[in-house]
Image: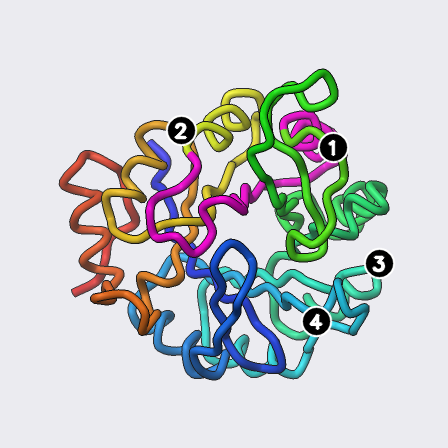
């Protein structure tokens, strides 16, 4: 049986890790380099960085921070934000990342998924999706709409249809970022995560809202997700407590969820 993965996700701006609530009101936590090193030493399975201002402000991705992080972490490391073309992808991979996460630019230019998959392999391409519950309509039959630019712009695109198109174009994984649950610490949006998991044949990553290990267990047991993103519960000062990766894996393993072992 394939093990489930825990991904530590860091929203990054100007070299700092920042947190938000429903994609708004960001506050800084610490340097990307220091936090990534600490979480890596705590034996996280993978690390994912989003440069959250690069796309909206049309800035190049912060390659220097990518390089500094890559020097200190030796688990799969993914980077997203500000990826506009194949050269941007190449530069991020050259700086030390193993995977590329594309989001807003993929909506604007879906062929970038095909191009990236052809050039670097599907295993390198994560299609990240900002999804918001809007109610079912003729144009949005899933009830979830795709947003871009840090939830600043809504596209009129149906989340499920975009997920299926992303798979058909060569994305190797889908990351489902719930705008409604982001930063709430109340659990993932299980409905849209399960809906997409049931309709694609590539790994799905649950994202947005985890506040305790039970929320992660729900994502694995109730949606079919292959991986779950955790962030605030690892390091946010606004939570009553932070968790170690070992604690989380112990809870999940006790619930019968196959996890990569934590080395004592």
Residue in view at x 41 percent, y 29 percent = 224
Circle 3 crowding by C-alpha within 10 Å: few under 14, some 14–19, many from 20: some
Q: Nearer the viewer, mark 2 or mark 3?
A: 2
Q: Earlier in the sequence, mark 2 or mark 4?
A: 4
Q: Is residue 183 magenta?
A: yes
Residue 178: % across, % down: 52, 44
Q: Secondary structure at mark 3?
A: loop
Give the magenta part as a residue range.
160-189
Q: Secondary structure at mark 1?
A: strand
Query: Which quadrant of the structure image shows residue 168?
Result: top right
Give the mark toward the camera: 2 or 4: 2
The kind of secondary structure element at disc 4 is helix
Is 192 left or right of 4, judged from the image as shown?
Answer: right
Considering depth in this image, is 191 or 198 the residue closer to the camera? Answer: 191
Position above or below: 146 against 86: above
Residue contact at pointers 3 and 4, CB within 8 angstroms = no
User: Which quadrant is the N terminus positioned in?
Assistant: top left
Please give the residue where the numbered disc 2 appears in the rendered image. 223
| Circle nearer the N terminus (3, 4) | 3
Q: Circle 3 sits on which residue?
A: 85
Return the residue at label 1.
157
From this view, report whether residue 75 is shown above or below residue 224.
below
Please give the residue where the numbered disc 4 appears in the rendered image. Answer: 94
Residue situated in front as seen by the camera: 225 or 263? 225
Q: Mark 1 or mark 2: which comes first in sequence?
A: 1
């Amino acid at each position: 049986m394939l093990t489930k993965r825990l991904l530590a996700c860091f929203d990054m701006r100007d070299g700092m890790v920042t947190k938000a609530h429903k994609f708004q009101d960001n506050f800084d936590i610490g340097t990307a380099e220091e936090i990534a090193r600490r979480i890596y030493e705590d034996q996280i399975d993978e690390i994912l960085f989003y440069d959250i201002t690069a796309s909206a402000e049309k800035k190049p991705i912060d390659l220097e921070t990518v390089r500094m992080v890559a020097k200190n972490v030796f688990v799969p490391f993914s980077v997203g934000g500000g990826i506009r073309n194949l050269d941007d992808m190449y530069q991020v991979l050259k700086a030390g990342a193993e995977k590329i996460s594309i989001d807003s630019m993929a909506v604007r230019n879906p062929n970038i998924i095909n191009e990236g998959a052809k050039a670097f392999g599907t295993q390198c391409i994560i299609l990240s999706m900002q999804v918001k519950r809007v109610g079912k309509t003729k144009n949005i039959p899933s009830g979830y709409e795709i947003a871009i630019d840090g939830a600043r712009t809504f596209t009129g695109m149906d989340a499920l249809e975009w997920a299926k198109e992303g798979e058909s174009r060569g994305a190797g994984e889908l990351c489902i970022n719930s705008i409604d649950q982001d930063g709430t610490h109340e659990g993932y949006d299980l409905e849209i995560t399960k809906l997409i998991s049931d309709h694609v044949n590539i790994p799905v990553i649950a994202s947005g809202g985890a506040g305790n290990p039970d929320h992660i267990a729900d994502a694995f047991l109730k949606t079919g997700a292959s991986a779950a993103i955790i962030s605030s519960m690892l390091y946010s000062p606004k939570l009553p407590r932070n968790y170690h990766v070992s604690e989380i894996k112990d809870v999940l393993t006790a619930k019968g969820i196959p996890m990569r072992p934590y080395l004592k």
